[in-house]
């Protein structure tokens, strides 16, 4: 479990200044122009979708279908510096993170499309190779998109469709007194100098496809209604996002979080794992959720509690610090 941390206050002070965490704390600003919800398409007047409200704030839009299921739709853009520095991994990541967004809704991925801008076709070769590698490993086809081979700069975005049953996971429904659960695949290592914990590119395809289905299983066993995939900003940034969409607070115990032995807390708490999810649930469901993950070799810890005051409290030994 946790290793000794000499100065928790200094660690948290550093975390407060991380741009990736600051971005997550203010992420609600990104959709102010359209609000927190929209009405579904006006072209399906004879179905259950008519005048259905779609909430905005999750990484994935969940669009109700006539049979009670949900069509899932998400997209990710990759910054140009990442594309230039590591085009293969940027391509791989663009597919991988979209799949994680679908999983966090308790869904399964259907297919992805892409938009690529490059100087010429050769300039996009490594990006394509990375996307195809992820597509094949996760078993999610690339079914089309848009390319432009006469651009001054590289650009990449990937969109994804998925499907969930009526048992949807969202980040809107965490309730006070529920327990916070953290599941991360620690069977990996950091990828180069990035704050990215890679348990994907070196993993077996069958394993990756099994892991994709675990949040779907949790949703349909009705063990939880709440999930958020751990992304940029790491554990702390993702908790901040969950607090925003559910309008709740969180209190965590640092000593309950498992991390790789030689990784400093400051780094681990902001790391982006290739497979990492936060759930909230009632106490009686903790053991079953942990079993679902542990059977596949995934660390799964109960790390805290959903609270009423909208603030993040971090406990370590006798110290209690407001983030």
Image: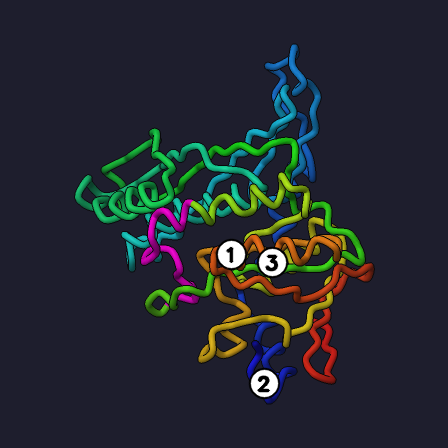
- Quadrant into which the N terminus falls: bottom right
Mark seen at residue 295: 1
Judged from the image, the secondary structure of the residue bearing numbered disc 1 is loop
* Position of residue 48 in the picture relative to residue 115 (left or right): right
Residue appearing at x 65%, y 10% in the figure: 46
Q: Quadrant of residue 310?
A: bottom right
Q: Is residue 289 above or below residue 31?
A: below
Q: Quadrant of residue 85?
A: bottom left
- Residue at mark 3: 290
Residue appearing at x 31%, y 41% in the figure: 136
Dot 2 or dot 3: first in sequence order is: 2
**x then y, percent, for residue 243:** 70, 56
Residue 122 in view (yes/no): yes
Judged from the image, the secondary structure of the residue bearing numbered disc 2 is loop
Residue appearing at x 49%, y 79% in the figure: 264
- Quadrant into which the C terminus falls: bottom right
Q: Which residues are magenta?
A: 194-209
Mark seen at residue 5: 2
- Mark 2 or 1, which is nearer the eye? 1
Toward the bottom, the furthest residue is 6
């Amino acid at each position: 479990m946790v290793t000794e941390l000499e100065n928790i206050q200094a660690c948290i002070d550093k975390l407060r200044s991380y741009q990736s965490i600051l971005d997550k704390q203010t992420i609600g600003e990104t959709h102010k122009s359209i609000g927190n919800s929209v009405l579904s398409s006006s072209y399906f007047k004879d179905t259950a979708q008519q005048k259905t409200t779609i909430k905005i704030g999750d990484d994935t839009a969940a669009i109700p279908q006539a049979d009670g299921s949900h069509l899932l739709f998400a997209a990710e853009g990759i910054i140009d510096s990442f594309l230039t520095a590591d085009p293969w991994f940027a391509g791989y990541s663009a597919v991988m993170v979209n799949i994680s967004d679908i999983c966090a809704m308790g869904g399964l991925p259907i297919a992805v499309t892409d938009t690529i801008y490059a100087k010429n076709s050769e300039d996009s070769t490594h990006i394509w190779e990375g996307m195809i590698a992820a597509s094949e490993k996760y078993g999610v086809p690339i079914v089309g998109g848009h390319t432009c081979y006469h651009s001054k700069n590289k650009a990449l975005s990937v969109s994804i469709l998925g499907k969930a049953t009526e048992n949807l996971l969202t980040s809107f429904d965490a309730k006070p007194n529920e327990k916070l659960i953290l599941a991360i695949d620690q069977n990996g290592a950091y990828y180069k100098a990035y704050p990215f914990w890679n348990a994907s590119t070196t993993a077996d395809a069958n394993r990756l496809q099994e892991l994709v289905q675990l949040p779907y299983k949790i949703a349909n066993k009705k063990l939880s209604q709440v999930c958020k995939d751990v992304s940029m900003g790491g554990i702390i940034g993702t908790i901040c996002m969950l607090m925003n969409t559910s309008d709740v607070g969180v209190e965590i115990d640092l000593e309950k979080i498992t991390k790789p032995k030689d990784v400093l807390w400051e780094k681990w708490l902001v790391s982006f794992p290739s497979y990492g999810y936060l759930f909230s649930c009632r106490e009686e469901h903790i053991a079953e959720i942990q079993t679902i993950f542990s059977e596949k070799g995934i660390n799964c810890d109960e790390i805290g509690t959903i609270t009423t005051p909208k603030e993040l409290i971090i406990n370590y030994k006798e110290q209690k610090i407001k983030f």
